[in-house]
Amino acid sequence: MAKEKIVLAYSGGLDTSVAISWLKENYDAEVIAYTADLGQIKNKKVIHDKSLATGAKRFYLEDLREKFLKDFAFKALAASALYEGKYPLISALSRPLIAQRMVEIAREEKATALAHGATGKGNDQVRFELTFKALAPNLKIIAPAREWEFKSREEEIAYSKKKKIPISVTKKNPYSIDRNLWGVSIECGILEEPWKEPPEDAYQMTVSPKRAPNKESYLSLEFEKGIPIKINGKKYQPVALMEKLNKIGGENGIGRIDIMENRLIGIKSREVYEAPGAMILYNAHDALERLVLDRETFHHKRLIAERYGQLIYNGLWFSPEREALEKFIAQTQKRVSGSVRVKLYKGNAIVVGRKSPYSLYQKDLATYSKEDIFDQKSAQGFIDLFGLPLKIMAPARKKKK
Ligand code: ARG
């Protein structure tokens, strides 16, 4: 009997392939490979066969695409959460879901440990392990990439050859890529030089804006309680909706992001992302909120968005703080229903129109035409009191310090 029975988060890439073999060798373990399809799986049979050929005892592949969007990505969208104001949390949103399912499978399989292929330098290790700790505090956690002796990808490749592990690393694909329906995270290779422009071949989902159509195209998006439900008047289920928006957005070169980013463990890194569909949605959702939310809720929600993004980024999905903020956000979304018109043109998704049954816009108050019903004289008293503290301060400002 094997000493350990380990459920491993498996992608089919180099690190997790090496991990299967390494775990068997170093922990005298039985390895159960677990893969979640979040929109990145091209061929189910290929990854299935590969996991077994690499030495997994069993292989699980689950289609979690809809759950990923409904229970994770759309919640980040409703919150307008972008880490450090820019990153739509593509990888960060996926890890708690994958880890949650791994815990459930570990219970069914009576496994003794959970493992992942994330390195000691990144955020993903934290996201996996905080979820493991929150949901299965008694299961052992193993992170082979933090323990093993390989110093580089080359050494891992050499080990794979020795162990006859099937891998598909080529010189032509020097990037580390993590893709799902919310977008793609791209790292490594030349991207580690912050001054150098990412080469076109780094991009996976978008054409260069230069090669996008020279003509503008229009899109209408309908939201219900903050959730996108229709494109151009036609209803879509979440997966089909994202596939369509990613396609249209990608063709128009929308959603390329190139930033310096502060990782949780303290390293600063250069990150390249593409989120064509998600960035169209962020723009449109924001435009609708600006129409239907009252000023104070809207302003408060912007503060929450920053914190919510940090919590997701830092792996704290299953934390009481995030769960409490989720309730606040859901309350704010009750009237975020309506439509937004977006113009797509060479890398831009520009909002050009918005409407909602819950619109707070009153033209007769805002207008500068003769339909105006606003009592301009009432503003004077408001300014007198709003400005009173400054007026009181004025003599003191004049005094020499
Ligand atoms: N910096 C991003 C994040 O922390 C991207 C992580 C990409 N993960 C990967 N395994 N390639 O979310």
Image (cartoon, grey):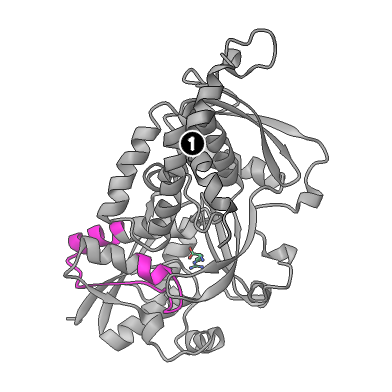
Quadrant of the image occupied by residue 214: top right
Q: Is residue 228 visible?
A: no
Q: Which residue is mark 1?
A: 388
Q: Horizontal and vertical percent for residue 213?
A: 79, 41
Residue at 33%, 46% (x, y): give it.
Answer: 325
Q: Is residue 135 magenta?
A: no
Quarter of the picture holding the N terminus:
bottom left
Q: Secondary structure at mark 1?
A: helix
Residue 268, image x, y percentages:
54, 74
- Residue furthest out toward the right: 214
Give the residue at the far top of this rendering.
371
Q: In the rendered view, tell whether residue 347 sits above or below residue 355.
A: below
Rendered view: 145 above or below 396 = below
- Residue occupying image coordinates x 65% and y 16%: 367
Q: Which residue is pictured at 40% across the width and 44% down the height?
A: 75
Question: Residue 360's spot in the image, x, y percent?
Answer: 50, 21
- As for residue 114 lying within the magenta part, the answer is yes
The kind of residue on which mark 1 rests is Leu
Indicate the quadrant containing the C terminus: top left, top right, bottom left or bottom right: bottom right
x and y, in percent, of residue 215 in the image: 81, 36
- Badge 1 crowding class, 10 Å Cα cut-off, few under 14, some 14 to 19, many 20 or more, is few
Residue stretch in magenta = 100-127
State the image quarter where residue 377 is shown: top right
Q: Residue at x 60, y 59 (%)?
A: 273
